Image: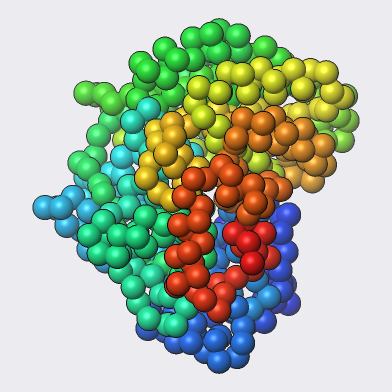
Amino acid sequence: MSSTASGKNGTWRNWGGNVVSRPAREVTPASVEELAAAVRQAAEDGLTVKPVGTGHSFTSIAATDGVLIRPQLLTGIRRIDRDAMTVTVEAGTPLKRLNVALAREALSLTNMGDIMEQTVSGATSTGTHGTGRDSASIAAQIKGLELVTADGSVLTCSEKENPEVFAAARIGLGALGIVTAITFAVEPVFLLTAREEPMPFERVLAEFDALWAENEHFEFYWFPHTGSTNTKRNNRSAGPEKPVGQVAGWFEDEFLSNGVFQVAQWVGRAVPATVPTIARVSSRALSARTYTDIPYKVYTSPRRVRFTEMEYAVPREALTETLRELKAMVDRSDLRVSFPVEVRTAPADDITLSTASGRDSAYVAVHMFKGTPYQAYFTAAERIFTAHEGRPHWGKVHTRDAEYFAGVYPRFGEFTALRDRLDPDRRFQNDYLRRVLGA
């Protein structure tokens, strides 16, 4: 089975297994013209339309009972422009394939998230990001977009062409049209040195501002039920390349992060009382390591252990307080949290509904192993995040609605007005968009 989540007899499931839908029909267009025709046909049949990538969203953002568009034939690089330093890529291209293809051309994206299974359009439309002091989300690296709008016409946008569409459609939630091609800024491939090392929770928080300021990319994982974290700093390097050795890499990334971690999750799910002990052992099993490689081999890592996730962006200056409250909440509850909490940052950007729109942001992601009840933990965490005017990741579990978003996104009305213009009949509507954008 491929990474594209799906099911039998016309049912569709996401990667996390927590969203199921039954589309009326599926279409796999082989060209932009075929995609536009499918949108026009859906309108004639009175059906809504939703493109779906690899199903890596934990929300029902891609679910539809109308026409499901699968983009796997709309893949590959259209063109590389070395003068402008851009690459134009078909929307269904998995990030993994884009990264490998760019590396072959001695090029790279500036920043990326930590998994690369998603399609470029799915990742950007939901605001997928990594961590960075100066470099922002994948969508913030977009220079141009091509999308099929509700009437079946093809619209292109950039800073110069249809700039108001460009401001919103880079993170369009699938609400403005179906993205068919994306032009990204790229740069000559470079080396990153990663330094991973355990650090006490209190020390990370006390020194957070310095760790953030001194590193191009800083992130850390806190293990609930412990006072331990694992920190990761990625900085540009003159080399030489020193990749993780095959044996060490297999041990750290496959055996510890996927194999043993999977078994620990099974044990924790079966016997929750063991979770704090497992957490203490896990946090101690990690040792410091340093390696140097090309960007995608440093930024991304395999994620084979399935989970459910909630992630909120809070103003960066509110991070330490948010984390202290989260730790206090877990410590006084009877929750058993077996997955580490991931903390990253992003600079402010100018995309209408980006979680970092107009403000320097810190991301706090909470996870639960697939099949473990997550509601109590996520509800308590969400209460803390929203008290700090947090903005949830569009593709991860949350309970917010349009009224809340109108309060935390100053440009929310700008987005909904554009949607009224581009999709007046709500061809791209689904239950999720009805909730987050309003009817």
Q: Residue at x 61, y 18 (%)?
A: 321
Q: Residue at x 29, y 65 (%)?
A: 162
Q: Residue at x 70, y 23 (%)?
A: 326
| Residue that extends furthest to the bottom in the rendered view of this protein | 44
Q: Position of residue 421 (x, y in %)?
A: 45, 72
Query: Is residue 115 shown to the viewer in this render?
Result: no
Please name whichever residue, 45 or 114, is drawn nearer the observer in this view of the structure. 45
Q: Residue at x 42, y 82 (%)?
A: 152
Please name whichever residue, 53 or 411, is drawn nearer the observer in this view of the structure. 411
Q: Quadrant of residue 414?
A: bottom left
On screen, residue 205 versus residue 189, left or right, reads right
Query: Is residue 62 shown to the viewer in this render?
Result: yes
Q: Position of residue 72 (x, y in %)?
A: 47, 69
Q: Is residue 354 above or below residue 74?
A: above
Q: Position of residue 434 (x, y in %)?
A: 65, 64
Image quarter in which the C terminus is found: bottom right
Q: How many marks?
A: 0
Please name whichever residue, 204 or 312, is drawn nearer the observer in this view of the structure. 312
Q: Is residue 94 above or below residue 235?
A: below
| Residue that extends furthest to the left in the rendered view of this protein | 83
Q: Position of residue 97 (x, y in %)?
A: 39, 55
Image quarter in which the N terminus is found: bottom right
On screen, residue 304 versus residue 135, left or right, reads right
Q: Quadrant of residue 387?
A: top right
Judging from the image, the colouring scheme is rainbow
